[in-house]
Amino acid sequence: MTTSRQTHRFSMPRLLRTISQIPTYVFMSVFLIYFLIPLFWLLISSTKTNAGLFSTFGLWFGKDFNFFQNLKDLFAYDNGHFALWMKNTAIYALIASLGSSFISAMAGYAFAQYRFAGRDLLFGIVLGSIFVPATVFAVPLFLLMSKSGLSNSLWAIILPSLVNPFGVYLMRIYAQQAVPQDLIDAARVDGAGEFRIFVTIVFRLIAPGYVTVLLFAFVGAWNNYFLPLLLLSKSDLYLLTVGLAYWNSLASQPGVAHVLYILVVTGSVVAIIPVMIVFLFLQRYWQGGLTLGSIKE
Amino acid sequence: MSLAETSVSTAPWRRRLKQTITPYLFLLPFLLGYVAFLIYPLIYSLNLSLYRKQLIGGVTFVGLANYVKVFSDSNFWEGIRNVLVFGAIQIPIMLGLALIFALLLDGAVTKGQTIFRLGFFLPFAVPSVVAALMWGYFYGQAFGPIAQIAEMLHLPPPMFLTAKTIIPSIANISTWQYTGYNMLIIFAALKAIPSELYEAARVDGANDWQIAWRIRIPLVWPAISLTIIFSVIGTLQLFNEPNVLTVVAPSVVNTHFTPNIYLYSIAFRNAQFEYSAAMAFALAIVTGILASLVLFVSSRIEEKQK
């Protein structure tokens, strides 16, 4: 009896509240469609034949399901260049992200843990460089890499990516929050060396921050275009982004067979899948990193 | 003091030396890379920008002549004008939407929060090259769904890649890609506000609008101003999207459509590295001026709110 009265009393405002929320949900849903529809189109299109791309409605499946044939064609085309680009991208993104985040973690920890001469000046310089446009480094890096002969290898793009000032900034803030001073002092009393303290104790404490910086660096590298376009001149060394843009330019040239469009579409799907997986499975780390980025001093 | 004097006194001395050196050792890998791949290229480029390569006479020192040339190069200013028009359209729309989404997700939207958050953020995972390719096809007449729908309705297909429409079309691509990212930055800042603040205001009779306008937005203003500054810097460096779209709209996206595209074509098509080095610094100067302007205005707004 009492329960029914209670539900009655409580359901009216709840109903009203639900009704008043409808405009909000409609608004949000319209934008959800806006954000997802190009990706939906890309996925649908990758299941079509090249002719089907032109002859069937873009936002629904065509007559044939050609996705696996497209995949086969994608990796076979041009002596398997696509697989090579994928390998390059994976090597570059893995080394650059693992390396740069470990280097950033060490530097960030140093800024957070120790007081030393020139600390604030150094940190200021590091912070300042976040705001310098990457363009400024593009031309000199290209010339220096060509001079040193590195422009014929992936190192031309890996080495500059190891320097991640924003990562240092994030790791410093994270280390300040996550590493208790007593713990470090206790380890010192026990006679542990500073580097051993870092590897065995600190690193475990700052691991969530480390993963965040790692993810940002990985996705940043995987999606990078401007510097790789300048620094890697041979098509054997292209990354996925550079290669896909190159194929797209070939596909758009009159006289060249249009068969390439479906390959660019399928290649785009394959190129975004690794990052999507990383995103969906490790989303709590993204959130963590963005929270860190918005903390002010 | 000889080494053999006492073994007891060397221990603290050595420990102090170790303590002094330790932070620098932790910093060493980063600083080495910083000097090799940031500072050195910067100095190299600064030096380069003071020279000019001539057909006769080879490379000669010209002082600031390259900078004078950049600042009087109408192509450079046309690019700057394009990115400023782009930014004036794109940044307010993107950050306005990001703020509205963040406010709604941190309050009004109680069900399906994760779906909206993830769905809005997902485009950030797409490489900007793929985003530009995809939207280029989407806009296109050959097999773009928008043109197909227009055809079904017997309407003339909308032209997205003409001289008049190209900037809004690129602005849409960037908005699609980065709104969710900016939304999450603001959302994270909103989450950090203690809810007692709202309750106190509500007890005082404030409605949702007043709470958003008077409490929530002022409190997350530092996060918002961060998104503004990064957007301004990103806008001035616009390259990937127009460079991909130049394939489908070569007459519209010309070789000086944005400063970075101009710089790229000067350096890598014409091999005028000295001039392009000067242009990169000129762009950095323009960026710096605009970013400080934004910082100044933003801190004024912050003061007013207090």
Image (cartoon, rainbow, N blue to C red):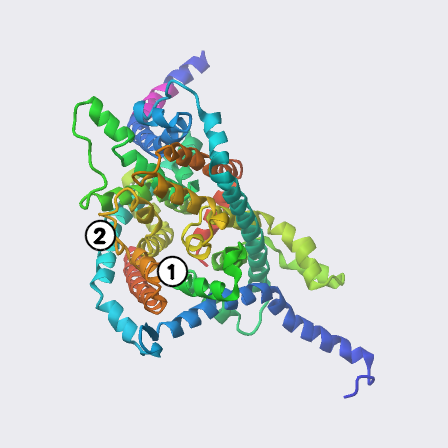
Determine the image quadrant of residue B131. top left
Residue projecting furthest to the top: A1
Q: Residue at x 80, y 84 (%)?
A: B3
Quarter holding the N terminus of chain A is top left
Provide the secondary structure element on which disc 1 rests.
helix
Provide the secondary structure element on which disc 2 rests.
helix
Residue numbers of the magenta segment: A10-19
Residue tagged by mark 1?
A: A135
Q: Amino acid at mark 2?
A: Val
- Residue A182 lies in the magenta stretch: no
Height in image: A171 above or below A147?
above
- Residue A14 lies in the magenta stretch: yes
Distance between the alpha carbons at the discs numbered 1 and 2? 20 Å
Residue A118 rendering spot, x and y as whole percentages: 53, 73
- Circle 1 residues within 10 Å: few <14, some 14–19, many ≥20: many
- To which chain does the residue with label 2 belong? B
Height in image: A226 above or below B276?
above
Q: Residue at x 68, y 72 (%)?
A: B18
- To which chain does the residue with label 1 belong? A
Q: Residue at x 58, y 65 (%)?
A: B27
**Residue A17 in view:** yes
> Does label 2 lie on the same chain as label 1?
no
Residue tagged by mark 2?
A: B85
- Circle 2 residues within 10 Å: few <14, some 14–19, many ≥20: some
B216 vs A103, nearest the viewer: A103
Residue A238 rendering spot, x and y as whole percentages: 47, 48
Q: Amino acid at mark 1?
A: Thr
